[in-house]
Amino acid sequence: MSKRLEKVTLEIAKYREDIIKRLMKYIETDVLLFWGEDKDLIACQEQKWKPLLEWAKKEFGANFKVSHDLEVKEENQKSGYRLRNFLEHLSDKELAAFYLAALNMRSVLMAAALVKGKITAKQAYEAAYLEELWQAEKWGVDDEAEKKRQERYKELKEVEDFLKK
């Protein structure tokens, strides 16, 4: 993937504005903002997601609101310009890593934490796939889903390693 990341970095340099615009769309549907309803799942989300949300609120100067349904909170829609400012200040290398991590995790907030070294690839993986891992623990592991998750973890680890170079 490092070759892939290097290639994406070159693309970032050419299409930086388009990529930032594309990433801006993800703030409203960030996985960290949509919590479950099961009390055990919420307890897991409190443990893994709440510290990330608190960091993101400070980092972006935004007041992100979580939802227990599919409603997009107005406050989250208004925070887009803060994400844009954050993205514009990333280097091409950081933005390439951010882009791939955000797509992997369905979360721009987690991608920001990973790129800024707030969390490790392992922590990012555990947070991004918290609901799937919780369900696997509760209902049993689906081998195909587990294989896909391990591929995603490997990608996140490569993003982390790429950033350290």
Image: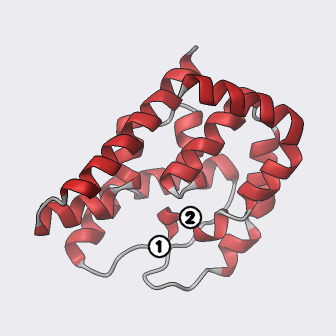
Q: Are marks 1 and 2 in contact (CB under 8 Å)?
A: yes
What residue is shown at x 35% (from left), y 76% (from top)? 36
Amino acid at pointer 2: Asp
Residue 118: % across, % down: 50, 36
Residue 3: % across, % down: 60, 23
The residue at which mark 2 appears reads as 30
Q: Count how many numbered circles sit on residues in the image.
A: 2
Residue 154: % across, % down: 39, 34
Dot 1, how many residues are within 10 Å of its Cα: few (below 14), some (14-19), or many (20+)?
Answer: some
Dot 2, how many residues are within 10 Å of its Cα: few (below 14), some (14-19), or many (20+)?
Answer: some
Name the disc covering residue 151, or none.
Answer: none
Residue 69 position (above or below residue 100): below
Left or right of 123 on screen, residue 62: right
Residue 84 position (above or below residue 160): below
Q: Quadrant of the C terminus?
A: top right
Amino acid at pointer 1: Phe
Q: In which quadrant of the rendered view does residue 115 lie?
A: top right
The residue at which mark 1 appears reads as 34
What residue is shown at x 72% (from left), y 73% (from top)? 77
Left or right of 28 on screen, residue 156: left
Residue 146 position (above or below residue 119): below
